[in-house]
Image (cartoon, grey):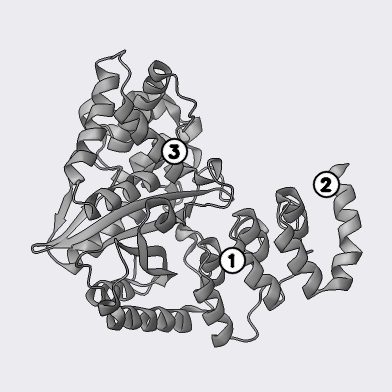
Amino acid sequence: MRSKGKGGGETDIETNITQLPVEVLHKIFQSNRLTLADMHRLAQVSHQFYDLINPKQMILQNKVLLAIPYFIKQNNMDINLGRSGICHALSLLWVKYTLDNKIEEFYNLLQKFIAYNDERRTNKDSELADFLIKIDKLQFPEKYDSNKRQIDADKLLNLSYAFQDSSLFTYGDLNNFFNTADLQDKVLTLSVITPSPCDPSIFIGHTVSLAKNAKGYVVYDPSAFYRLEEITNTKELINFLMNVFFKGPPQSKDVLMPFYLTILEKHPNEKNHDMYHNLQELKKQRLIEHNDQKTPAAYGSINPLHWAVYNDDTNAIETLQTINPQINLNERGQNQATPLTLAIARRNISASLLLINMGSSFTEEDGLERNALDITLNLKNGSLLSAMQNKNPTEFKRNIEKTIIKYYK
C-alpha cells in the first residue's frame, strides 16, 4: 500500500502506521486499497487496526488469534502465541491434513475456534486444546525441543521433504519451477520474509500452501477469508502469489524475489527422481545467474547467500561457493549481520558449521555489536565452539577470554 509523497514520489504509509490516528486507519481500510498482505501486516504492527475490521471481513488467521486468548483462559492452558501471526503453523497443518485426506477436519477445527470465542463458551474442549498445541509446536518448536526449528517441518509433522529451494526468483524462474514440479500426491509451501515496515532490522514473514488437482491449483492463504483460491493455470497462480506477498506484480519480470519453497509428501518416492533432479538443476541455474545480485529494497535487499543461510539451505550455500570460490563469506546483510551471525542467531546449526568450515569469521560484529562467538556462548552450543576452535585455534584463543568477560560482566 503506497501513496504519493509531497514531491510526487511514493511514500510507504506502513512506515509510520503506529503513529497514525484511528480515524486515518479507518479511512485507509475503507478505501479498498489494501491487499490481504497489507491487512495482515497492519494488524501485526498496530493493535488499533484489529478494532477496525468488520467480523465478516476479518482475516481468518487474525480471527483465530483473537479467539485463542479466551480459549486458553477457559481451558487453563499454559500457551502464549501473542499477536505475531500463525500463518506458518496453519499452512503446515493444512499440508498435513491435506496429505492425510482430513482437510474438512482442519477447516472444522478453525471454525470451532472462532465460534468458541464468538459465543463466549465456557466448556473445556480437548480436541481444540490438542489442535492449539499443534499450532504452538509448529510456530515455536524450540519451546518444546531446543534442537527443533520451524524449518524442521518434516520431523515435526512426520512427513518427508521431497525438495527445498531457498533462492532468488524472477517471474520467469517461478514459472519454470511450477511447470517442472509435478505436485501429484504432494503439497507445496511458500514463504517470503520481508523487512518490518517499522524496523528494517526486523523481518516479517508470511507462508501459504498449495496443492494441485485436476482443475489446476488450490491455494490456502491463512490470512484470506473463508475460502480457498482455485486457480486454473501457472500464470494466474504466480500473479496471485505476487498479490499475496508483494502487493502486486513486480515492475519488471527480471526483478528478484526471495522465495523459500518446500515440497512435502507422506513418504519418499523414488519414482520422482527425474523431477527432483530437474528442480535441482533449475535451482543451480538460478544461483549461477543471481549469485552476485540482491533483491530490490522493497523486497528486503536480500542476497542469495544470506537467504540460503536464513533458511539453513546448506546445498545452496555450497553451490554458491562452487560458483564463486572467492565469495565474501562475511558480507553484510540486514542490520549488518554476517552470514555466520545470522545462521547462529537463527540456530541453523548445519549452515553455521558449514560456514565455519568454509572460513567465515566468528569475530566480526553485526549491527547489535555482537559476533558469532558471543551468540554461540549465549546459546551454550559446544559443537559450534569446537568447530571454531578447530578451524582457527589462534583466533579462537585470542578472542574467547575477552568474549567470556564481555558476556558475564
**Cβ–Cβ below 8 Å for labels 3 and 1?**
no
Which residue: 41% across, 22% down? 72
Residue 136, labelled with which disc? 3
Q: Amino acid at mark 2?
A: Tyr
Q: Earlier in the sequence, mark 3 or mark 1?
A: 3
Residue denoted by label 2: 407
- How far is the residue under mark 2 from the one under mark 1? 24 Å
Please identify, in this view, whether the residue under mark 2 or under mark 3 is nearer the observer.
3
Determine crowd level at label 3: few under 14, some 14-19, many 20+ residues with C-alpha closer than 10 A.
Answer: some
Rendering coords of residue 100 (x, y %): 23, 52
The disc placed on residue 52 is: none
Per the image, label 3 sits on a secondary structure element best described as helix
| Along the line of sight, the residue nearer the viewer: 114 or 1 | 114
User: Image height check: is 40 above or below 23?
Assistant: below
Image marks 2 and 1: residues in contact by CB distance under 8 Å: no
Instruction: Looking at the image, tell me whether mark 2 or mark 3 is earlier in sequence order.
Output: 3
Q: Residue at x 59, y 50 (%)?
A: 201
Residue situated in front as seen by the camera: 150 or 305: 150
Q: Which residue is mark 1?
A: 350
Mark 2 near mark 3, Cβ–Cβ under 8 Å?
no
- Which amino acid is tagged 3? Asp
Kindly identify the amino acid type of the residue bearing the numbered disc 1: Ser
- In the displayed structure, does residue 6 sit left or right of residue 63? right
